[in-house]
Amino acid sequence: MNELIAAFEFRLPEVMALLGSGGKTSLMFTLAAELAAQGRRVVTTTTTKIWAPTADQSRTVVLDSDHRVLMAKVRSALKEHPHVTMADSKTTDGKLVGIPPEVVDDLFSDGDVDLIIVEADGSRGLPLKGPGTEEPAIPGLASIVVPVAGLGGLGRPLGKDTTFRPERFGRLAGLEPGQTVTPESLARVLFHEQGLCRNLPEKARLVAFLNQADLVSPEVARTAAEAAYDAGPDTLARVIWGSLNNPVAGFGLWPE
């Protein structure tokens, strides 16, 4: 998995914001675990809502609706645990309620953390999504923003089985309901001016991550990565693709 960490070329300390669908939570906790194993201090959180992590994902979860108290608890927890998940509260159905982006900025500014990873929008567990009008909620100090998509949605009809807000996805991609989602249409949604990557911090660099490569052919995965890179802005450093469910297969990079 060090291969995946190296692909992101972290410039620690920094704040990472994850957007999109198809593996944000898995990516967040995978990176956090590996960096913590290297002795880094990592905080995982959300500015929306996420399911509470399992013990394998994050053993230390800190909650407090008083955000000054929350930050103090996180700083204290990091003295004993290299990876801490923080949130405002927990709902009755088991979701963590996120914190405002400015609280992430405040914690990072204190200088006690190597990396804060933030889920900055929601997706309901589907491979693809059309962004909502109020999304994303990215901390102002985020220096690396990662649009995520699931390749398992490619080659399938646009609809509710694969896509959160399919009507929004279709409008940005130029697809009608039921038409096949292609690598090029996915790329358009990722980097459309009204797509996933809008309202980004001025100095943030982009690194796209295409998950679920085990669900498509190697040729389709590579084509999708090339299409995403071609559609991206100058701040897009690279596109990474692979499978978080099958990491031993390795991860690809474009440009190589």
Image: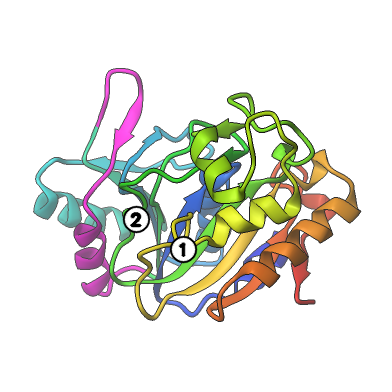
Q: Is residue 150 magenta?
A: no
Image: 165 above or below 217: above
Q: Residue at x 61, y 57 (%)?
A: 188
Q: Depth check: 250 or 135 in front? A: 135
Q: What's the residue type where badge 1 is placed?
A: Glu
Q: Is residue 216 left or right of residue 72?
A: right
Q: Residue at x 35, y 72 (%)?
A: 201
Task: Name the outermost residue toward the top.
Answer: 92
Q: Which mark identifies residue 139? A: none
Q: Residue at x 73, y 38 (%)?
A: 152
Crowd around label 2: few <14 · some 14–19 · many ≥20 (10 Å): few
Q: Is residue 106 left or right of residue 246?
A: left
Asked where in the image residue 14 lies, by quadrant, the reply is bottom left
Q: Report if residue 56 is visible in the image.
A: yes
Asked where in the image residue 230 lies, by quadrant, the reply is bottom right
What residue is pinned by disc 1?
193
What residue is pinned by disc 2?
80
If the image is split into quadrants, where does the C terminus sit? bottom right
Q: Is residue 122 left or right of residue 223?
A: left
Q: Is residue 146 left or right of residue 201?
A: right
Mark 2–mark 1 CB contact (< 8 Å): no
Disc nearest the viewer among 2 and 1: 1
Range covered by the magenta-colored residues? 90-113
Please provide percent x and percent y for residue 243: 74, 47
Please provide percent x and percent y for residue 122: 42, 40
